[in-house]
Amino acid sequence: MRCTAVGPDDQWDAALYHRSLSLVEVTRSLAAPTVLMPDADADRDGILVWVTADWPDGPDRLTVVTTSGPHRFVTDCVTDAVILRIPAESFGVGRGVIASLSGAALARSHLATAAVCAVRGFAASVLGTDVDSFSTLAAESAMIDLLVVTVAEANARRTESSSNTEYVRRRTAELIELHHRDPEFSPTTLAERMHLSRRQFYRHFEACDHSVAEMIADRRLRAARGLLVSNPSASVAWVARASGFGSVGPFRLRFRREFGVGPTEFRDQMAENNDGVYAG
């Protein structure tokens, strides 16, 4: 795994615990806003299972990706994460099935909830204590079996729903929420992750008031609006990058068009009117 800070390096901090067992590598982290991504060289031929939650009490999200895929996980607040690295040959689901899940959090189900609880419990039992890796082999195998069944169920649900407009719109909203801070994230990315052509993808949004590109931009603007107030010493350029805008110029123009003032003026007004407290 590669870990990169979101925002100024001097404001980033993390606590990391790692242990290699017979089959599984386990990492537990509590980290400031971060970009996590597979390392194509170090993590070759593996499956990564991420269980993440906004600290201290956000809901858990379960994500399964291949180490050779392009997926990145971007957090925008302090995040409590458990990461399992499982050899591909030990995981009973093909890479094509995992790739079809688009690198997004698996939809909630009783099985997915059970898997999340099991992953966190497993990590807690093997980290911070002196365990013999061979004594954990049965537990590792059982954990992998549970995750395989969970992924298979998620894939079956996706296959049943992929032609449904309501599903595509809901999944689009979920993916935008997870990945809007990635400047490379776009409608084309969404179509590819859902294994739809751009024409097929756009057809699901023909009756909407806003285009998918506008939905992504609006979410980035909302993120930027919060960062402007919660990070008063951060530059406008940093806020633009941290919100997912590729450059500061388009960010300034879109922000002014949406809110009637530029980013700096907006922050000054919020500081004067609300004593720096942002509620939206």
Image (cartoon, helix red, strand yellow):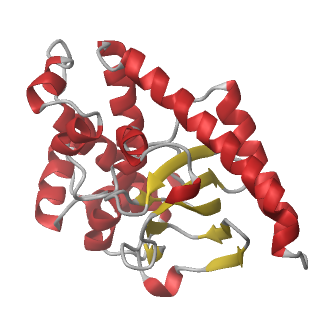
Q: Nearer the viewer, residue 145 or 155?
A: 145
Q: Is residue 7 left or right of residue 110?
A: left
Can see residue 276?
Answer: no
Residue 260 % position (x, y): 20, 45
Residue 248 % position (x, y): 17, 66
Q: Residue at x 42, y 54 (%)?
A: 270
Can see residue 82?
Answer: yes
Q: Is residue 82 left or right of residue 268?
A: right
Q: Is residue 274 above or below residue 171?
A: below
Q: Is residue 257 above or below residue 132?
A: above
Q: Nearer the viewer, residue 43 or 259?
A: 43
Q: Residue at x 40, y 48 (%)?
A: 95
**Residue lying at the far front of the rendered structure:** 89
Determine which quarter of the picture holds residue 61.
top right
Q: Is residue 61 left or right of residue 274?
A: right
Residue 155 % position (x, y): 46, 30
Q: Residue at x 59, y 80 (%)?
A: 13
